[in-house]
Image (spheres, rainbow, N blue to C red):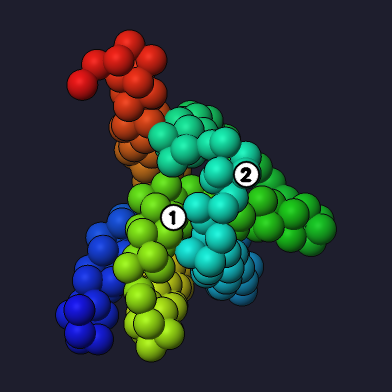
Amino acid sequence: MGIFEFSVMVFTSFFSLINPLGVMPIFMSMSGNLSPKDRSRIAIKAILVSLFALIIFALAGQLIFRFFSITVDSLRIAGGIIFFMMGYDMLQAKIVRVKMDDPSEIKQYGSDIAITPLAIPMICGPGAITNAIVLWADATTPTLKLVMLGVMAGVLLLTLLALLGAGKMVPWLGETGNKIMMRLMGLIVMVIAVEFFFAGLTPILRRILKIG
C-alpha cells in the first residue's frame, strides 16, 4: 500500500471513529459553567491524554490485551457503563448545578472530565483503540508507522480545534441554554452508552452460547 493511500485510510478511519463534531456539543455542555481558560485547559489535556493512550495501544495494545486477558468487547462494555453514568448525571443537569468557587475544585473537576469521559472513552474509545492496533500492524515499514502517527495526531488536532471552537459558543447560550443542552446531550450520551454496552456484550454472549 502506498503512503498516500495509507494516509487517506488512517485519516478517514480515525476521523470517523473519533467524530470531532460529535464530541464538540457534549464537551460544550459539560464545561458550560467554566471559564474560557479552564475550558481550553481541559480540551488540551483531553487531547494529550487521548494521543498518549492511542500511541501506547498502537505500540503495545495486543501485548496489553493478552497480558490482562481482556478483549475490545470488554472495553466496549466498560465504556458503555461509564458513558451511561455520565449521561445520567448530565440528564439531571447535576454538573451545571455544581458551584465551584474554590480554584482547586475547578482544577480537580477539569482534570476529572478531561480524562474521563472526554479522553477515554469519548475521544479515545474502543473503536479508535482497535483501529490504532490494527493500523499499526498494517504499517509494515517505519515510514508508514511515522505517517500513521502523524495523521493520527492531525485528527486529534482537528478535534482540539473543534473543542476550542465549542467553548466560544457557551456564552451565547447562557445558563438556561447550557442546562437545556446538557439534558439533551445527556440523553444522547445514554443512548450511545447502550450501543457501546450491547456492541460489546453481543459478541461475548455469542461466544458463550456458541452462536455463529
User: Position of 162 compared to 7: left or right?
Assistant: right
Amino acid type of the residue that numbered disc 1 sits on in the rendered structure: Ile
Q: Please identify the residue farthest to the front as the structure is shown.
A: 140
Separation of marks 2 and 1 at Cα, in angstroms:
16 Å
Which residue is drawn at the image coordinates 74% and 54% (left, top)? 108
Choose between 67 and 187: the one closer to the eye.
67
Vertically, is 147 above or below 17?
Answer: below
The quarter of the picture where residue 33 lies is: bottom right
- State the image coordinates of residue 211 (x, y, percent, origin top left): 24, 16
User: Position of 136 compared to 10: left or right?
Assistant: right
Single out the mark in the foreground, 2 or 1. 2
Q: Which mark is residue 37?
A: none
Choose between 18 and 136: the one closer to the eye.
136
Q: Which mark is residue 129?
A: 1
Label located before the other in sequence (2 or 1):
2
Give the residue pinned by disc 2.
67
Vertically, is 152 above or below 204?
Answer: below
Which residue is drawn at the image coordinates 59% and 50% (left, top)? 64
Q: Quadrant of the N terminus?
A: bottom left
Amino acid type of the residue that numbered disc 2 sits on in the rendered structure: Phe
**Callout 2: helix, strand or loop?**
helix
The quarter of the picture where residue 4 lies is: bottom left
Choose between 83 and 177: the one closer to the eye.
83
Vertically, is 94 above or below 181?
Answer: above
Q: What is the crowding at mark 1: few (fewer than 14 residues within 10 Å), some, or many (at least 20)? A: many
